[in-house]
Image (tube, rainbow, N blue to C red):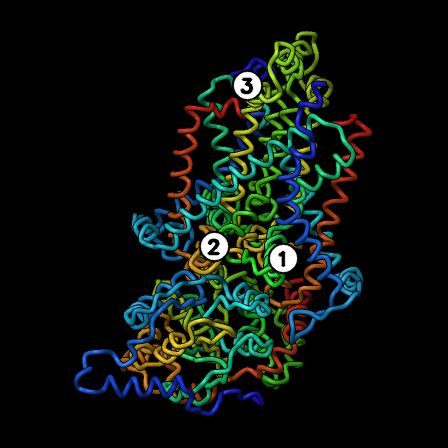
Amino acid sequence: MRHDAEPRPFSLLSPALLVITIGLLLPMAMMFRFSLNRYSANELMTQALTFSNYARFFGDAFYLGILGKTIAVALASTFVALVLGVPAAYFLARLSAPRLKSALILMTVIPLLMGNSVRTAGWMVLLGDRGLCNAILIFLGISDEPLRILYTGKAVLIALVGAILPYMIISLQSVLEGIERVYEEAALTLGAHPATMFRRVLLPMLMPGIFSGSLLCFILAMNAYATPLLIGGPTFQMMAPLVYQQLTKVFDWPFASSMAFVLMSVTLASLVLSSVFIQRRYGRL
Amino acid sequence: MAVGLRALPGRTAFLASVGLAYLLVLAPLIAVFWVSFFRNKIIAFPPQGYTLAWFANAWSLDDFRNGFVLSLEIGVVATIGSLLIGVPAALALARHDFRGREAISAALMSPLIVPGIVAGTAVYMFYIEIETWTDVQLAATLPGLCLAHVVLALPWTVRLVTASLVGVNRLVEEAAMTLGAGPALTLWRVTLPMIRPAIVAGGLFSFVVSFVDLEKSLFLVGPGRMTLPIAIINYLEWSIDPTIAAVATIQIVIISAALLLTDRFVRLSRVF
Amino acid sequence: MADTRAEAPTLSRRRLLEITGAAAAALPVYGAIPARADIGGELTIANWGGDWNDRCVQVFEAPVIEKKGIKLVHDLQPVPERKAKLLAEQHLPRGTIDVVHLSDADAYEMNERGVLEPLDLSRLPNYQNIRSNLRLPHLVTWIFGGIVMMYNPNKITEPPTSFTDLWNPKYAGRVGLMDQLYFNYIYAASLTNGGTMGDVQKAFPALLELKKAVQPRLYASHQTLAAGFANEEVWISAEYSARIIQWIKEGLPVQWSYPKEGAVVVSFGASLPKRGKNRDAAYFYLNEMLSPQVTAGIAEATSYAPGTTNSALSPDLRARLDFTPEQSAKMNFADYAYAAKNDSSWVEWWNKNMKG
């Protein structure tokens, strides 16, 4: 009786599904069709039904290498963001002064508003050969001559972690807020070492946050465009800048589309794999 | 300071890693603030002196002012749009078990997975295709751009609100129903207030991802219409003076002021 | 170039009306009315944004075009997006852009892909003022420059004389290259190794040697290269002359020198996309781009050399911006057809070998 009065799931979902279908799913289906076409120097592409663009990608160690590097960078930056994000989120969640907490939340979210191209300009000033970091290192006598940080993998990792950390902190913090402090205190009162308490009590309860935060950061890092291009320099090649180059400079849309689908499939596959793994280990989240 | 914190023996290491995390998040922001006062005509360290001239320049350029206003408008539309369609979708996903639930949930999350430049190109080509079939112009129009931004923002609303709904105690809603409240009234007076923090958070993230989007908008803006991130990269093609730092500083100060004002009404400390 | 689409003058009805209109305007009674008072309406211009567009507006569009009562709408974006949009929209019944600003190579490519309208030269009396070696059938060229050597005089006291200075092991680690100029470095390497602009096969082994000898630093954009010079990360490069002159103006410690192989030419101008709406205003715009005052103004504003022979540039500005007759004589022009055919494979080679 009561359930009849409740709105059906379909009517609740249909506006969102309509928007997502027109605004993304159909366009992506079209893009997939592009990936089966053939490149032509005279027209945008010629109609075909071929997997040669995918074969070109998978048959070339160079492109596979870039895919591998993209995955490695995304994994590494997600891992660092997780390791740094857990203490930061814990600190934030357990702050009791509401003003301070609001301020810290704003300080977490506001850097996101800079946009990636401006953020990279900030990193350039900090990490360049004669940037602030090198000036400090030389002033302190830690190093005699400037370390080359900008335009290396290290710089990309630093900048990427800085860009995805806010998402990690917020994801973890929202879960931590839901965990009553009583559990931690009980464990500590009963004599558990803080590290044991963290591992045995907090970590299992924090798992949903770790899972969703890491997935989010991994996706953002896989698709990163401005950071690798401007901080890593052109020699630090990742997938998104490569797709961009094929789309807008070479105009090889079939190849660009197939690379985009390879990238997305890898992202999607890692999502599915990790969720299966996590569910097996920690139950459905 | 929290009780749990003081009890940690590795407190120094703990605080150091919190400090490092915030250093990585805030360092570029502080650098950009600082650079906006540099006298150097090409952004580089060390500063050759300080000036306010870049703020005057940033303010005098129409592209930045108009871009800021347009990005703000689109951000607001994206936020409202994604809440209007995202909250009902989250209700369906969290409160109903039906066939294809996982698939629909994945579809609603898909805008996160598609790289911005790919989504932008695909949507643009699709708009062109629609126009050749139906004569309805979406490419280079404001509705077309807004639709793309609603899609961009949607996963954030759906994700945050669904997570919050799962955590809400259903007993409270059932109690309201038992006391005679209809489903609509229960939704309005009981459920929505309980998930208000998630709605605010979803709205905030919707605004942020729309406001800073560059790659997806590149193809979808049209003549006479340019978002702020596009105005910034257009500017960067010809000069790398601190004007863009000044633009970012002004933009962040304005939006932070708006957020602080919001904080008076909806405590951000209780939102996340 | 085989494809000379520039049409012979034809006396169309519209043209006849214009002539009679002009004649009418010449009558004493109507003396106060501008000759072509009938043009007006809206004109959509696709161009680069930022300072570039601001300069175009200041020295040309506001004083010449808008003053005529033509309302300008700008579609501002980097050139790859501009080209991609032209291509994508080619099957639409409506045209969105009336005039598109392009470089010489871009214009050739867009024309080959069928999105540009052939220019009706009878409606462009000023076209004949374009320097003869810069005349293209699908582009109204107003300024040009070339790839020359760029160096930091505080670090390199002897000005570079040749593109081969990029290979000098003395500058190992101090050579900066701009990623998007890859094709110019391919040309430079070809010219210094016995190749030509129309056959660059010799460039590829030479560039690999360059990579081994000096480990060049690659920059993603012109402006990050400038920042690299400001930081003294790099001391030497090859760049567009106008960019270098502009940076000198901004106080960057750099100089430019002319390579003995001759600069690789780049020119800029505007074209007509197919199905543009306001053709009268578009032709007015294109023709006025070439007037002596406008070419002088835009050359001064952008630091390029005027592409016309009758530019009203002052002698001292001409000395600073224009090339000497000897330098002009040695200029290298791209073989557009060859470049367009090979560009995709050049990009792949560059990605794999210079960025790998």
Q: Secondary structure at mark 1?
A: helix
Residue beneath label 3, please?
B189
Above or below C125: residue A191: above
**Horizontal relation, residue C274 to residue A53: left or right:** left
Identify the amino acid type marked 2: Ile
Same chain for marks 3 and 2?
A: yes
**Horizontal relation, residue C76 to residue B120: left or right:** left
Nearer-N-terminus badge (3/2): 3
Comparing labels 1 and 2, the label whose residue is closer to the camera: 1
Comparing labels 3 and 2, the label whose residue is closer to the camera: 3
Identify the amino acid type marked 3: Arg
Rendered-image quadrant of the C terminus of chain A: top right
Residue beneath label 1, please?
B126
| CA separation in Å, label 3 and label 1 | 41 Å
Residue beneath label 2, please?
B230
Identify the amino acid type marked 1: Phe
Residue A125 in the image: x percent, y percent?
Answer: 46, 49
Nearer-N-terminus badge (1/2): 1
Closer-to-camera residue (C39/A80):
C39
Q: Are marks 1 and 2 in contact (CB under 8 Å)?
A: no
Q: In the picture, residue C24 is in which quadrant?
A: bottom left
Q: In the picture, residue C37 is in which quadrant?
A: bottom left
Query: Tag 1, which chain?
Result: B
Query: Tag 2, which chain?
Result: B
Q: In the picture, residue B134 is in which quadrant?
A: bottom right
